Image: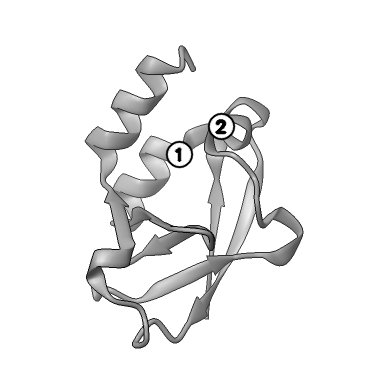
Amino acid sequence: MKIVLNFKNIISELESKELKLCFLKDRGIFIEDMQANLYMMESYRYGSYLDRLIKDGTTVEFNLVNGKNINDWEKEIWGVSDVKSFMERQSL
């Protein structure tokens, strides 16, 4: 299973698909759905910075991964309000 996000419209994408951004230390950007399933960014985009993805309006594919071996304390979860705050701070 996969999720495709267009970072040009990241706020509306997160809201309409009911998703959250998930940052895992030293593992990159992931997506978490309403059932707490994790989706990993396609390897071509791995290591991309969030501000660059938004500025460039990049479309990225995320693939379902087994997140059972990832503890909650390893995750930094961002909802829509966190992404909006980030965009304001970065003037995006």
Q: Which is more N-terminal, label 2 or label 1?
A: 1
User: Within the image, what quadrant is residue 52 found in?
Assistant: top right
Q: Estimate the x, y position of residue 43 in percent, counting from the top left.
A: 71, 65
Q: In the picture shown, does residue 67 fall above or below 20?
A: below
The residue tagged with tag 2: helix, strand or loop?
helix
At 53% from the left and 63% from the top, the residue drawn is 27
Q: Which residue lies under the disc numbered 1?
A: 10
The residue tagged with tag 1: helix, strand or loop?
helix
Foreground pick, 57 / 22: 22
User: Within the image, what quadrant is residue 89 found in?
Assistant: top left
User: Within the image, what quadrant is residue 17 found in?
Assistant: bottom left
Q: Is residue 34 visible?
A: no
Q: Residues within 10 Å of mark 2 (few under 14, many from 20)?
A: some
Q: Which residue lies under the disc numbered 2?
A: 54
Which residue reaches farthest right?
A: 44
Q: Estimate the x, y position of residue 90 in percent, counting from the top left.
A: 46, 17
Count of marks, rendered view: 2
At 34% from the left and 87% from the top, the residue drawn is 68
Q: In the picture shown, does residue 3 fall above or below 5?
A: below
